Amino acid sequence: MGDRTYWVYILASRRNGTLYVGVTSDLVRRVWEHKSDAVDGYTKAYHVHDLVWYEGHATAEAAIAREKQIKRWQRAWKVELIEAGNPYWNDLYSTIVD
């Protein structure tokens, strides 16, 4: 495998709003898909469009394991994870776009 990074990310509808945890190999494209409602599903139905946290992994297996771990967490732990690096729940999308 090359230099590919696999991303685990959390989207929110607003501060302390609805959360979505996902995994992707192309964070910019995937978040754009969520933001533009390009795919029917949970994030489109609940207007979950703000990238509030993300983390890179060297392998798909590691990223998927981390995604599953976070999905099992209590909501309070997810909020704590977000607020540790993004206390105001800013949309981080502009920080990942070239």
Image: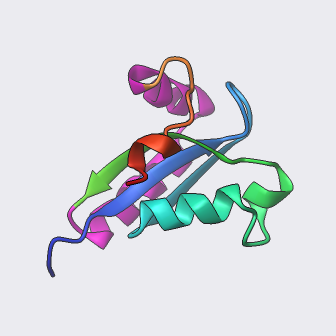
Name above or below for residue 22 compared with residue 81.
below
Quick one: which residue is furthest to the left in this view?
2
Q: Position of residue 38 (x, y in %)?
A: 72, 71
Residue 10 % position (x, y): 54, 45
Q: Residue furthest front?
A: 98
Quarter placement of the C terminus = bottom left
Q: Is residue 55 magenta?
A: no
Q: Is residue 74 above or below residue 60?
A: above
**Name of the residue lying farthest toward the top:** 87
Q: Residue 84 in magenta? A: yes
Taking 58 as reference, is 69 above or below it? above
Which residue occupies 79% across, 59% down?
Answer: 44
Q: Residue at x 26, y 58 (%)?
A: 57
- Left or right: 18 with respect to 54? right
Q: Which quadrant, please, contains the N terminus?
A: bottom left
Q: Which residues are magenta?
A: 58-85
Please provide percent x and percent y for residue 31.
56, 58
Q: Residue at x 23, y 71 (%)?
A: 4
Image point (39%, 25%), residue name: 85
Residue 21, how many percent across, how many down?
56, 51
Query: Which quadrant of the structure image shows residue 61?
Result: bottom left
